[in-house]
Amino acid sequence: KDWKGIPYKVANQLNNCTAKGRDIQTVDFGPDGAWFINGIKPDETGGHSWWGSTLAEDMIKEYTSGARRVKPSFGTDLFGAETYAIIQGNNGYALSNNLHADLSEKIERIHDRSETIDFVRLFKDGKFFMSSSDGIIYLTRNDHIDAEIRTLGVVEEIAIAGDGSWVVIGKEKFASSTGVDPALKKKMSEFFSSQRRWCNERRREIQEAETAARQQREREEREAQEAAELAE
């Protein structure tokens, strides 16, 4: 597949996974070249992780040797140095020492309380987003993104590119900025339209089944009443 706007090593590994029948479970790459991919076959065999160009290499190697899922995220601080957050399982973590203090402290509190981290996303210049069982915390330095986060309520995914373009995905719709590839926006629009149609069809089928069941019940009750009256 001809991927657009992502590092060659990431694109190459994604294509290798696809060619070998692996589904991609996790993928992340940062603005300074750090990257991570995890893939597994549909029958849940052949799981493997690949990574490169990251200061967290030793920690990722240690974490991926265990059974719990590993979800790294990479960004940079205000000086262009790599930042990383490696989440293992529900709340295990390894963090770079230059991560934003608010985010680091929040992750530590979640771990101490045995709560759950859904996902962490790191971006350029110290920006970040995290979703957890305790809610969300974010720093985007972008009023438009912040407004969309508030509007969507539940954020399923968020991406902010190095050029400042962005996408925020909710449960039923998405929002994006100018600069996002039109082909990508078209695919996402088609996906959510398809999901809405599916949900509407399921709701209609459930409503029809409930109506049919109610009518059947009312008919049986009526027939029983008529039979009781005749017996008198």
Image: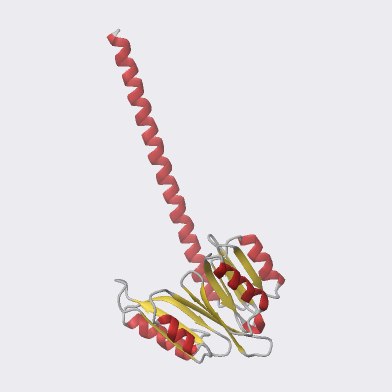
Horizontal and vertical percent for residue 92? 50, 74
Q: Who's the residue at 62% across and 76% down the image?
A: 104
Q: Is residue 28 or residue 64 the one in the foreground?
A: 64
Quadrant of residue 2 within the rendered picture: bottom left
Query: Which color scheme does this rendered protein use?
Result: secondary structure
Check the picture and name the quadrant holding the C terminus.
top left
Q: Who's the residue at 51% across and 87% down the image?
A: 56
Horizontal and vertical percent for residue 175? 60, 67
Q: Who's the residue at 52% across and 77% down the image?
A: 93
Check the picture and name the quadrant holding the N terminus.
bottom left
Question: From what the image shows, is residue 27 above or below residue 157?
Answer: below
Could you tell me if residue 169 is visible in this image? no
Query: Is residue 129 left or right of 114 when viewed as pictured?
Result: right
Could you tell me if residue 195 is visible in this image? yes
Residue, far bottom: 53
Q: Is residue 168 or residue 127 the one in the foreground?
A: 127
Q: Who's the residue at 43% across and 50% down the image?
A: 201
Residue, far top: 232
Residue, far front: 112
Question: From what the image shows, is residue 227 above or below residue 220?
Answer: above
Question: From what the image shows, is residue 202 above or below residue 63?
Answer: above
Q: Is residue 109 or residue 83 the one in the foreground?
A: 109
Horizontal and vertical percent for residue 214? 39, 32
Horizontal and vertical percent for residue 179? 62, 79
Question: From what the image shows, is residue 202 above or below residue 12?
Answer: above
Label total for image: 0
